[in-house]
Amino acid sequence: MNISEHLQSAVIIGTGHSGVQAAETLRESGWTGRIVLLGEEQHAPYQRPPLSKDYLDLDKAAGPLPLRAPSFFEEHRIELRLGVRVESIDRAARSVRLSGREQVPFSKLVIATGASNRALDIPGSALSGIVGLKSLDDAGNLRELLGPAWNIVVVGAGFIGLEFASAARAMGKNVTVLEFADRPMSRALSPAMGDFFARHHVDAGINLRLSEGIASFLGDEDGNVATAVSTSGSQYAADLVVVGVGVVPNTGLARAAGLPVDNGIVVDHDLRTEDPDIYAVGDCASFPSPTGTGRIRLESVQNSTDQAKHAAGQIAGGADARYEPVPWFWSIQGGVRLQIAGLSSPGNETVLRGDPGSGKFSVFCFDGEVLTAVESVNRPGDHVAARKLLGRVLAVTPEQCGDTAFDLKSQSNALALTG
Amino acid sequence: MITATFNNYIGGAELVKMEQGVSIMKAAILNGVGNIVGECGGQAMCATCHVIVRPEHREQLPPLSEDEDEMLDCAATARAEGSRLGCQLKAGEHFSTIEVDLPETQ
Ligand SMILES: Cc1cc2nc3c(=O)[nH]c(=O)nc-3n(C[C@H](O)[C@H](O)[C@H](O)COP(=O)(O)OP(=O)(O)OC[C@H]3O[C@@H](n4cnc5c(N)ncnc54)[C@H](O)[C@@H]3O)c2cc1C
Ligand code: FES
């Protein structure tokens, strides 16, 4: 190790999926300098997706799924510091300042601060019993409130809200979901898929109120929430309210340091900000759309880990591969397994493969001739094929996708072999 | 005592004690075995918990579900005889002792 390498220090802000992955990939790509991983949460790094799924099962002991073994950080010479909040980035001095005023110098900085739940700003939203679900602490709190709760209102029919609603309904709770849009998960799913899930949740006994937002909450004399009042004036009894109305990226540090922000910290194809020594990855990063128009910001495990790997590879050795992964995502709602590969756009044409009535089908989304995304319900084979087909021009035609007799698997394997 | 032995592709072996109900994927992460990722948190959605079960331990295991079977086609290292998703195999429920090989990449 030469002296300049010894003085090199990579600092990562955030101990979530992307921060931990960035640290690991840095070390594995041959970075010999210090790696300092800073996170404000007290808990050892853990996986978030189970928090709205398995973790809500009150019959099972609560235990988070760690992202890595406790010994991992020491073995990889990663200086993991929990319970420390970064207050500011000083670009001129090349250091970050922690809550206790301590300065940590960096030669490379990775911002992996994730996103925060969007708060409701309506009358009554400060009553107790109105909660969000983002962190392990939130999930622990929710587990405690869930047991005794009977009437539950979920605000927002997004992925997390509906995963929670299904889990609560499966426990026999009385669950109402209020959604401002006319379909659930409408930002992310095709209309056909959104309609399928709407039916599924209604059949499961969830009171799914579409085109009906939240207007206010009324409390009891102890300051606990008691009623949710919707935009149509209807009142729903509520002893627990879970708010899932989306997130806002944690861009404050970057903005204060003069880095451009546009619905996320602005980065280039290599996840680099305007400052060549500062990268941003994961839920907080706004990157150039792979299809060439505008910027996108994704909230998924795949996106966080793949971006972190790419950025860390750049920092450690300037790997020259382009960042162009196939995005994928999943959700489990009341036993229904949804898998999404690719990214669709609102105007895409869609083709059904299989019958939604059978509970096993996929929606293939096309932009002209180009397959952009595949949403699958209980058809894992379509999802796997989609991951191999996406990004290839003329891989399959809409007619082929709609024909269940067409052998999608062989087609995808043949194309995958051609590289 | 329930145990799992992990053989990594460069020839090292690691014996891990497991608690009832814990999956092979979770045991590998908790014990820092390495080379198991578990990106989807154990939902049979990612195939980054791929293990190859040694022949003498295969019989006791439940058959592959459609999900597990299809997702194994997505594994970074091509599937082989005995390939399983580590998140779907639970201590006590499916085995009391097991030995697996870890693929080179997940
Ligand atoms: C309940 C839930 C369920 C989900 N389910 C799925 C799913 O099924 N599939 C899927 O693909 N994705 C899912 N996601 C999304 C996925 O978890 C996120 O995309 C992923 O966690 C993003 O990783 P990240 O590292 O960018 O951010 P995060 O994991 O949010 O980590 C950011 C960390 O940075 C810390 N931090 C922020 N600011 C500072 C500061 N100034 N100083 C120090 N630390 C700071 C935060 O406290 C946090 O710990 C789910 C998310 C949630 C909340
Ligand atoms: S952990 Fe994802 S498939 Fe097993």
Image (cartoon, grey):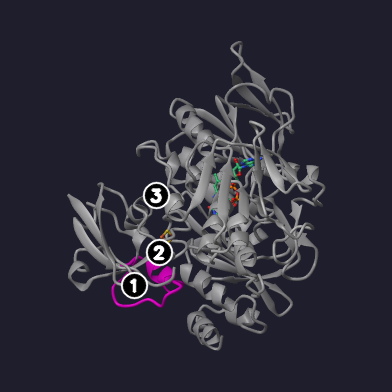
Mark 1 surroundings within 10 Å by alpha-carbon count, few (fewer than 14), some (14 through 19), many (20 or more): few
Q: Chain of mark 3?
A: A
Task: Specify the quadrant of the image occupied by residue A296.
Answer: bottom right
The secondary structure type at the circle numbered 1 is loop
Question: Relative to residue A264, is residue B62 depicted above or below?
Answer: below
Residue at the far top in the pictured view:
A221
Residue A315 in the image: state x and y as whole percent: 64, 63
**Mark positioned earlier in the residue sequence (2 or 1):** 1
Residue A298 in the image: state x and y as whole percent: 66, 56
Mark 1 → mark 3, Cα distance in angstroms: 21 Å
Mark 2 → mark 1, Cα distance in angstroms: 9 Å
Q: Which residue is mark 1?
A: B9
Mark 2 surroundings within 10 Å by alpha-carbon count, few (fewer than 14), some (14 through 19), many (20 or more): some
- Which marked residue is nearer to the observer: mark 1 or mark 3? 3
Question: Relative to residue A353, is residue A215 depicted above or below?
Answer: above
Mark 3 → mark 2, Cα distance in angstroms: 14 Å
| Residue behind label 3 places its C-beta within 8 angstroms of ligand 2 | no
Q: Is residue A64 shown left or right of residue B5?
A: right
Does the magenta-highlighted stretch encompass residue A135?
Answer: no
Q: Which residue is mark 2?
A: B35
- Residue type for callout 1: Tyr
- Residue type for callout 3: Ser
Residue A383 in the image: state x and y as whole percent: 52, 69
Residue occupying image coordinates x 39% and y 37%: A62
Q: Which residues are magenta?
A: B64-84
Whether callout 2 and callout 1 share a subunit is answered yes
- Which marked residue is nearer to the observer: mark 3 or mark 2? 3
Mark 2 in CB contact with mark 1 (< 8 angstroms):
yes
The secondary structure type at the circle numbered 2 is loop
Q: Which residue is mark 3?
A: A71
Mark 1 in CB contact with mark 3 (< 8 angstroms):
no
